[in-house]
């Protein structure tokens, strides 16, 4: 996956602001969603994203992180923030 060319991302603290210049849609992402976006944009697999988050939060539940990461990726794709290579 890669970032859509019509999307701009600005870091805001640990999170980010994502703006689609074509649609005008604007989204504020928390720190974890920003990590998912950055790793996915860099072609990290879903399992790779989960492992990275688990590295930062080793006591977290893997199943919950997997579900949250998948939901975040689905959201980013549905809003054309992340697109196929």
Image (spheres, grey):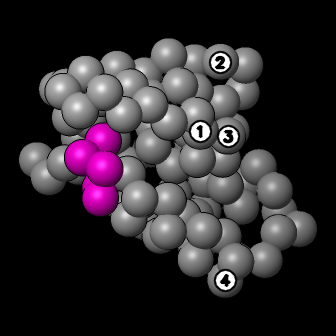
Residue 63's tag is 4
Q: Secondary structure at mark 1?
A: strand
Residue at 23% x, 33% y is 23
Alpha carbon of mark 4 to alpha carbon of mark 1: how far? Answer: 21 Å
Q: Whole-Å distance between the Cαs marked 2 and 3?
A: 9 Å
Q: Which region of the structure is painted magenta? A: 77-81
**Marks 2 and 1, how far apart in space?**
9 Å
Q: Position of residue 79 (x, y in %)?
A: 31, 50
- The residue lying furthest to the bottom in this view is 63
Measure how far apart labels 1 and 3 are at the Cα level. Answer: 4 Å
Q: Is residue 61 left or right of residue 40?
A: right
Determine whether label 4 and label 2 are within 8 Å by CB. Answer: no
The mark that comes first in sequence, 2 or 1, is: 2
Residue at the spot of label 2: 12
Can residue 82 be seen in the rendering of this structure?
no
Q: Which residue is mark 1?
A: 29
Magenta highlight: main SS: loop
Between circles 4 and 3, the one closer to the viewer is 3
Foreground disc of the pair 4, 2: 2
Mark 1 vs 3: CB contact within 8 A: yes
Q: Residues within 10 Å of mark 1 (few under 14, many from 20)?
A: many
In the picture of the structure, the residue carrying the numbered disc 3 is 30
Quick check: is 79 in the magenta stretch?
Answer: yes
């Amino acid at each position: 996956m890669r970032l859509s060319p019509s999307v701009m991302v600005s870091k805001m603290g640990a999170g980010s602001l994502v703006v689609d210049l074509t649609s005008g849609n604007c989204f504020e992402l928390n720190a974890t969603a920003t990590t998912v976006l950055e790793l996915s944009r860099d072609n990290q697999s879903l399992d790779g994203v989960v492992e990275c988050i688990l590295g930062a939060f080793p006591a977290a539940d893997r199943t919950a992180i997997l579900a949250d990461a998948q939901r975040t990726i689905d959201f980013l794709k549905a809003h054309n923030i992340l697109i196929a290579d």
